[in-house]
Image: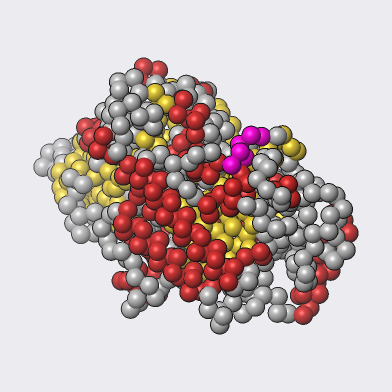
Amino acid sequence: MPPLADPQRIAALLYCSLCLCLTLGCDDDGSNATPSDAPPDAIADAMADTAISEPDGMDGTLDPMPDTGPDASDAMAGDTMPADADLRPDGPPPARCSAPPAVPLMPSGPLPPVARIHPGIDALEAEAWQTLRDGLMAAPGVHFVATFDHTLDAHVIEGGPLDARTRLVVRRVDEADRSRLDVIEGTIEDIFPSTDAERHGDYAGLLDALENPEGVVIADRGYAEDDPRVGWLSLEAQSWPDPLERLTTLFDAVDAPDAIVGLWPWSQGGTGSHGGLGLLQSQAIFIVSGAGARRGVVIDAAARLVDAAPTALAALGIPTTGGVGPDGIYADGLYLARQDGVVRWEALDPDPCVRPKYVVMILFDGLQAAELNHLMFADDPPVDVPAFRTFAAEGTVFRYGAVVGFPSYSAPGHATAGTGVWPGHHGVVGNSILDRAAQATINPFAVLTELQAYFAEPQRLYDLVDRMFTGDAETVSQALHRALDGETFTAVLNELTIGGADYTPLDHFGIGRRKASVGDSERVDALGQLMVEALIGDPRQPVPELLQLSILATDAAGENAGPHSDLLRQTVATIDRRLTVIREAYARRGVLDETLFILVSDHGMELTDPTRNGALGAAVRDTGIRTRYMAQGSIWLATMAVAAEPTDDGLRVTVTAHDNGRPLEGVTVRCTGCGGLLGEDEGITDAEGRVTLALGVLAEPESVRASHPEFNPQTLDLR
């Protein structure tokens, strides 16, 4: 269905456009279009920077274009062209305009109560957690452990160097129109010496910072001896961007773990790795290119992955709404009903009427910002990536990429890019999650890898998505449909956030249950390319206002051989050819000049040291503490709840699973002080989780201790 079909709605939007143009300045016809395309080679020297002032006060850089031909000086839109240049296109102006508000918007609606969940550690889990925490703090590969402590009503992070472990206690304080994180014990720098997100955006500088004092060689992954790509950041060169916000928000999810463990970045295991809080694993790409974007600009700043979704929606000029803002408090002027990100206005054309009609969001799994910058901007790159270079020439590149959520794994990152909120707010808190209520695991990537199994029962797929996204977040498709009264068409391909989409790959095959290889991922990527070609090339289908697509092979290549490996670069070159095909499909449809592309990745990637493995699983097993589930640093403890009440027959003890209240059968219950004369001090629970112990003469019950082979023991004090 074409957008804006309602004449009254069209009139209202055109009136709004006129008001914005009068206020903010447009050309006579309400438009100010971008000029002709910049040549791909026009950004060869784009990293030579000249300071400019960004729309929101952020300092950035506008890169001078090299003299590559008679038209090269005209390649920069708005910044180097004469002020009176007439760049208006033929045809009507865009239907919608948007611009950042002149003053901060204040809430105008009712303020809903703040709801925070915080699974974390409560009194029943405290004993087991203390034992587990002590064991983890003694493990050399562990950098920190984090949880929400219900006794303190605060988040607790413990860690730092092995010989100088310390504790950080953080409490979120909610106020009328905002919230803040207060450090009430400890110092951030003792655990996270640097939190600077703007480090190592330059490939050459990153190589200079890497150290390999032991001369480790990774020959089986294609690295030569003394290869400068083989090395690791020292503690002084490392950084952990925005650690408090990323850690604390994780525990806002219903199915958040009880605790999460962060390893030192070099000790994650594998060749290339991610999942941690460190800079390189947290540093995704962020490029805004095409219609409505500033052209040929490199901004010396780091965005955040949560900014991608609101930026896409703002570029389309949709109406804003009230909802839950970045502080977890009601806010107006949002583009999503729940929104942790901000609009990156500095990447968009400052003219509010230069806006795209269509947005394509492409996520490249595991592609690291410094590596892509190198391939796009180097004078003599190791592989040619003309499509990526064209995107950079026609848009804005954030030199330091985008800081992703935590943990920096694929499923949380995909969901964050498509919802604009952190993992704890959309509910996808890992690549594998424990459903606390069902005590079953959720595999978010079943949406992609087990698609064939959903052919006969498509509703099962949507049920999985509904269960997986447990927060109150909206997908970008859902936000568009809400804001435009359903008068829009969206497509989500090879992506998790299919909620609200009009076109999905339900009629295409997945790749099976096994772990994907580079070849497997490339076949899925090829399928995505074919789906885009089929959709955009079909004149019977409208061009989607929003199209989301994931490219997976970069993650498999990076994990297999590292983020700067020959394999990764060959994979990026293959993907670059796919991007060319996608651009050509939009060009054949006649809408390329009306389309904005937002390129992001779900997380970064970092080479790991094969001689130093954190061995988290072994560290947990050595403590003897039982976990209900453990996945990639997230830990759900196996905890029982014990209750006791006197009856005419004695002392009735009931034992249930702490997570969901399910009765536990086969629990051995021992009572201290119940026996007395002719009494019972031990029993085993039945199918209802109950056992009644006969109290003897002179019995003085003191405590009950419950034991089960799959759970941590639990003691109930009866005094």
Which residue is depicted at the point 40% across and 61% down? 525
Residue 638 position, x and y percent, is: 28, 45
Above or below — where is 297 with respect to 512?
Answer: above
Say whether residue 593 is left or right of residue 540: right
The quarter in which the C terminus is drawn is top left
The overriding secondary structure of the stretch rendered in magenta is: loop
Which residue is depicted at the point 39% across and 69% down? 461
Which residue is depicted at the point 88% across and 59% down? 22
Say whether residue 86 is left or right of residue 581: right
Which residue is depicted at the point 53% across and 39% down? 378
**What coloring was used for the rendering?**
secondary structure
Residue 526 position, x and y percent, is: 40, 64
Give the mark count: 0
Residue 331 position, x and y percent, is: 69, 52
Above or below — where is 487 with respect to 664?
Answer: below
In this rendered view, identify the residue nearer to me: 214 or 74. 74
Q: Which residues are magenta?
A: 44-49
Say whether residue 458 is left or right of residue 422: left
- Classify residue 564 by image quadrant: top left
The quarter in which the N terminus is drawn is bottom right
Q: Is residue 37 visible?
A: yes
In this rendered view, identify the residue nearer to me: 116 or 39. 39
- Classify residue 700 by image quadrant: top left
Residue 25 shown in magenta: no
**Residue that protrudes farthest toward the front in the picture:** 70
